[in-house]
Image (cartoon, grey):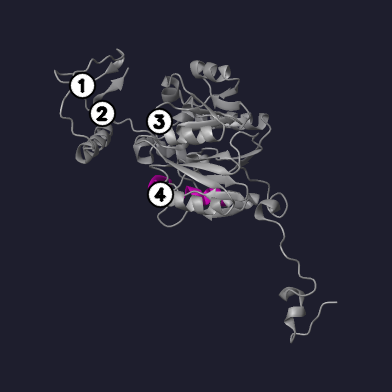
């Protein structure tokens, strides 16, 4: 019988007396019971559920693509059709599809949901996008996670920035995080703190200038196989992959990856991926590695992938890069050796002189 003598509260259940029930399970152990179903610690195990945002009226903002950091204006109906086909491909693979469905018109990049969170065995780390253009998109994802009963174990705060596409599970005990334009050092520090509380080690690697996300240079497709973009992926990342037992296969030709998003795929399960249609060379390379390729059209959606195409802006960006190299001047050459240069005839804008080949980078292009 409950003791009701308030002069001896320690005997009451609410104060730890008879009838007190201590919380015995970890947060991970409460998923699928007290909380909703979710959590992950692998990049290649079968996908069971995904969170998407179907693009809509917000794509009208793509009429001014530079202002919203996308490539070109999008056709809403065509983008929606391609998104629906992608969602169906997930269902066909056995995954449950959930949606971020804002009440008001969201920001035009809301469909890139992978940037807005990172899943752990205990729930989601809520991202904080680096660009003001995308600021606030994470609020809509937070609402969707709450509705699904998924715990948010950390929201990146302060001056930290972090986007989910900059982190990957190498094993249940190790995560790799890319530090660059989208995820800063403070964001990495916060990720390391929360994951260390779960017993997970964080390996952080710097990313080259001119790249966006770690996911744009590294993909994991199986227990011991990773795919990488040559030159982009830094040595420290390859070294960490090797330590975890991964073989790393590099794209033999990046032309399709540049022009048709051939590297923008999702691992559906062990050596099974969902990839953009229309990439025969890259698909043949993947299939040569015993990867089952499911394809879906994405060319309209790909227009929303942020990259700079305006020649004036390219001139400014590369000019700033070259100024940094000049000002920091890591090496002073005392002797200028003679060079022989060979380049593909499709490369235009190269300037040579009697000393060497010094072209402003913004002026070089490929037909």
Q: Which mark is residue 362?
A: 2
Q: Is residue 286 magenta?
A: no
Which residue was labeled with disc 1? 357
Q: Position of residue 179 (x, y in %)?
A: 41, 43
Disc 2, SS: helix
Q: What residue is rendered at 71% in x and 57% in y?
A: 25
Magenta region, mostly helix, strand or loop?
helix
The Cα–Cα distance between marks 1 and 3, rounded to whole angstroms, is 23 Å
* Whether residue 323 is visible: yes
Q: What residue is rendered at 67% in x and 55% in y?
A: 26
Which residue was labeled with disc 3? 232
Between circles 2 and 3, the one closer to the viewer is: 3
Q: What's drawn in magenta, residue-wise?
A: 130-142
The Cα–Cα distance between marks 4 and 1, rounded to whole angstroms, is 36 Å
* Whether residue 305 is visible: no
Which residue was labeled with disc 4? 185
């Amino acid at each position: 019988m409950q003791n009701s003598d308030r002069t001896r509260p320690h005997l009451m259940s609410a104060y730890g007396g008879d009838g007190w029930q201590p919380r015995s399970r970890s947060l991970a152990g409460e998923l699928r019971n007290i909380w909703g179903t979710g959590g992950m610690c692998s990049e290649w195990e079968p996908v069971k559920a995904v969170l998407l945002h179907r693009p809509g009226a917000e794509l009208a903002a793509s009429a001014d693509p530079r202002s919203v950091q996308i490539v070109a204006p999008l056709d809403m109906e065509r983008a929606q059709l391609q998104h629906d086909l992608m969602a169906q491909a997930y269902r066909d693979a056995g995954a449950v599809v959930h949606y971020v469905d804002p009440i008001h018109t969201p920001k035009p990049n809301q469909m890139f949901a992978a940037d807005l969170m990172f899943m752990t065995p205990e729930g989601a780390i809520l991202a904080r996008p680096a660009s003001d253009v995308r600021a606030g998109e994470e609020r809509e994802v937070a609402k969707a996670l709450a509705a699904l009963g998924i715990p948010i174990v950390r929201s990146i705060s302060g001056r930290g920035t972090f986007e989910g596409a900059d982190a990957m599970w190498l094993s249940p005990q190790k995560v790799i995080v890319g530090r660059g334009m989208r995820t800063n050092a403070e964001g990495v520090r916060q990720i390391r703190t929360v994951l260390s509380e779960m017993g997970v080690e964080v390996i952080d690697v710097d990313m080259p200038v001119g790249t966006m996300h770690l996911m744009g240079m590294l993909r994991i497709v199986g227990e011991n196989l990773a795919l990488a973009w040559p030159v982009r992926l830094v040595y420290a990342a390859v070294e960490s992959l090797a330590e975890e037992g991964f073989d790393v296969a590099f794209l033999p030709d990046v032309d399709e990856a540049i022009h048709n998003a051939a590297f923008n795929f999702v691992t559906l399960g062990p050596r099974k991926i969902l990839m953009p249609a229309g990439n025969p060379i890259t698909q043949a390379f993947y299939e040569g590695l015993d990867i089952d390729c499911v394809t879906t059209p994405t060319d309209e959606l790909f227009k929303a992938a942020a990259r700079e195409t305006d020649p004036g802006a390219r001139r400014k960006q590369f000019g700033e890069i070259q100024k940094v190299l000049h000002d920091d001047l890591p090496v002073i050459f005392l002797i200028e050796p003679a060079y022989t240069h060979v380049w593909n005839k499709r490369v235009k804008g190269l300037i040579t002189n009697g000393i060497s080949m010094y072209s402003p980078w913004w002026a070089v292009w490929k037909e």
